[in-house]
Image (cartoon, coloured by chain):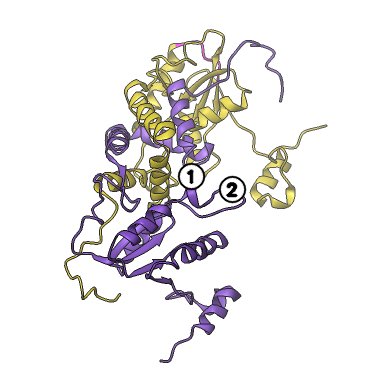
Chain colours: A yellow, B purple
Amino acid sequence: MQPARRFPQIRTLMPASDIEALIKLLAKLPGLGPRSARRAALHMIKRRESLMDPLARALAGAAQNIRTCSECGNLDTLDPCALCSDGRRDGSMICVVEEVADLWAMERGGAFKGLYHVLGGTLSALDGIGPEDLNIASLIRRIEAGNISEVILATNATVDGQTTGHYITDRLAPTNVTVSRLAHGVPVGGELDYLDDGTLAAALKSRRPV
Amino acid sequence: MQPARRFPQIRTLMPASDIEALIKLLAKLPGLGPRSARRAALHMIKRRESLMDPLARALAGAAQNIRTCSECGNLDTLDPCALCSDGRRDGSMICVVEEVADLWAMERGGAFKGLYHVLGGTLSALDGIGPEDLNIASLIRRIEAGNISEVILATNATVDGQTTGHYITDRLAPTNVTVSRLAHGVPVGGELDYLDDGTLAAALKSRRPV
């Protein structure tokens, strides 16, 4: 770059510190880099009443009100959460998921009417995450305490997710509870040509009579 | 989808309303859809002290403090902005840009030491944006008022950007000011093989003796 000879002391830092601070924080969100954080900041500054003020209030409100359910690990304004305290749900089934996002995904599907348990991650030797770092002890307590008849493992179909599932299966062996896991197979609406070989093999192995 | 026969009245709405409101607002940001907004919300809830609270404060602070410079249209906590009131900058040159983001891009480059003028968009017949919707009248006023010797058009190299540039050139014809525009050519570090034909043709046409 050509040195600015005529105006040697000029600072070329921009934007103003308030915007700079905002951009730096926005860039920490997943899916936003420095460039898209700048774009998001300008977008908000243009829409102060309709977006920036409401978002500031929503963030402050959520930061104050959202808590982790002491029973299942879900996030809600209530503790126990709305799911755990909903008497109409089937209290004999617990679906074990890795993260709250997975719980939301299950609920969007709407096919499961039991209770949940959020592990808060997966076992990972590489990242040094052991059983004591996850909500596994509380899962065992819930099962030992009550009338749970089935635990459905809905951890991700990744190596870490499946390892975690196996570990929980082992830990639950002494209890009388039935342990099941989500089926592997062809996604509904999916085309065979685009499927990986592992999924195809699993779908073939688990084929069902028509 | 299978109807939930056993529990007909169960609501399957999740997440809690506070998180829901936050996600809806986040999804309005450019670059974030519903899925990435959910991910961002969960990411923040996990990092309440380090990210969520600071971001809420930064948003509220920026919403309160940031204003548009009445001189050039830049965003700053001051009016006139730090650039306009910096006596070390060359007050005889004005660089005309479409948006504040373009001004930031120019400042990051650090090659320009004059003043700016932010149009706030481009002329667009399709979107019904005419000259009165942009900060063009204030640009004319600035040039008529003072010692401006050169106006550099740095609108985008798009159809709308170039149209806007032509329009401003016409409007400035009665004044004595020199009007220039950014050069077209091969980006520094760019490979010819990946360039579009229009850019290559422009670079060839504007070739310079070595």
Compared across the picture, whether A36 is left or right of A2 comes to right
Quadrant where the image shows the C terminus of chain A: top right
Q: Is residue B55 above or below residue B119?
A: above
Location of mark 2 (residue): B127
Compared across the picture, whether A151 is left or right of B92 comes to right
Main secondary structure type of the part rendered in magenta: loop
Q: Give me the chain letter of mark 2.
A: B
Residue A149 magenta-drawn? yes
The front one of A120 and B55 is: B55
Q: Residues within 10 Å of mark 2 (few under 14, many from 20)?
A: few
Residue B141, visible in the rendered structure: yes
Q: Is residue B203 above or below residue A114?
A: below
Q: Position of residue B176 (x, y in %)?
A: 37, 70
Labelled pair 1, 2 in contact (Cβ < 8 Å): no
Q: Nearer the viewer, mark 1 or mark 2?
A: 2
Residue depicted at 46% across the width and 37% down the height: B39
Q: Amino acid at mark 1?
A: Pro
Q: Position of residue B72 (x, y in %)?
A: 33, 53
> What are the residue bounds of the magenta stretch?
A146-150
Residue A17 image label: none
Location of mark 1 (residue): B30
The front one of A119 and B174 is: B174
Q: Position of residue A130 (x, y in %)?
A: 36, 37
Residue A125 magenta-drawn? no
Q: Give me the chain letter of mark 1.
A: B
Per the image, label 2 sits on a secondary structure element best described as loop
Q: Amino acid at mark 2?
A: Asp
Q: Let me know if marks 1 and 2 both belong to one chain.
A: yes
Quadrant where the image shows the N terminus of chain A: bottom left
Residue depicted at 49% across the width and 16% down the height: A83
Q: Position of residue B110 (x, y in %)?
A: 29, 66
